[in-house]
Image (spheres, rainbow, N blue to C red):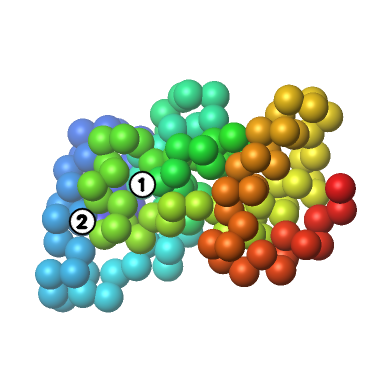
Amino acid sequence: MLQIASDTDAKPAAAAFGYLVDNVGLGQPYEQFHPRDFPNFKFVLAVKPDGTKSMESPHSVYTNANSAIMGFAVLDASLKSKAKKLHIEEYPRAAALINVLSSKPSKDPSTAQRWFEFLATRSGGESSAPLQLVQV
């Protein structure tokens, strides 16, 4: 089912995705389905930070639109009601944020300010201990 939902042909992909979402949690074979167990399948419609739409894997998409500030894809608005069934997280985890900060540091002061404003909203959510490792 995920292969079809990940297909580049939009019509069968949409039908497979709809069937999957409608049946998650309703018994076998989808009772224990967790999309994060299939990281190589890109079947979730998302919006990239540049505004383009693309199919992404569930582990690389977040529901909070401000996640795009840090370069993460955001779940397409048409799927917000399906986010819980798909186990789409609201925010990137601390490790992913640290990876962005350390591997792609911003040289633009305005972008850096937006990043740290976003990070300030995340303090207290998940353990902030990993964020203390970031040198400023």
Mark 2: secondary structure? helix
Inspect the image, locate mark 2, and give the three-letter code of the amino acid beneath it: Leu
**32 w.r.t. 53: above or below:** below
Residue visible at 26% across and 59% down?
Answer: 85
At which x and y percent is residue 105?
80, 39
Inspect the image, locate mark 1, and give the three-letter code of the amino acid beneath it: Phe
Q: Nearer the viewer, residue 18 or 115?
A: 115
Tell me if I can see residue 13 in this picture. no
Tell me if I can see residue 37 in this picture. yes
**111 w.r.t. 40: above or below:** above
Q: Nearer the viewer, residue 52 or 93?
A: 93
Q: Nearer the viewer, residue 116 or 24?
A: 116
Q: Which residue is mark 1?
A: 43
Cα separation, mark 2 vs mark 1, equals 11 Å
Looking at this rendering, what residue extends furthest in the right direction? 135
Q: Which residue is mark 2?
A: 20
Asked if the residue at tag 1 contacts the one at tag 2, i.e. Cβ–Cβ closer than 8 Å, the answer is yes
At which x and y percent is residue 96?
64, 55
At which x and y percent is residue 133?
81, 62
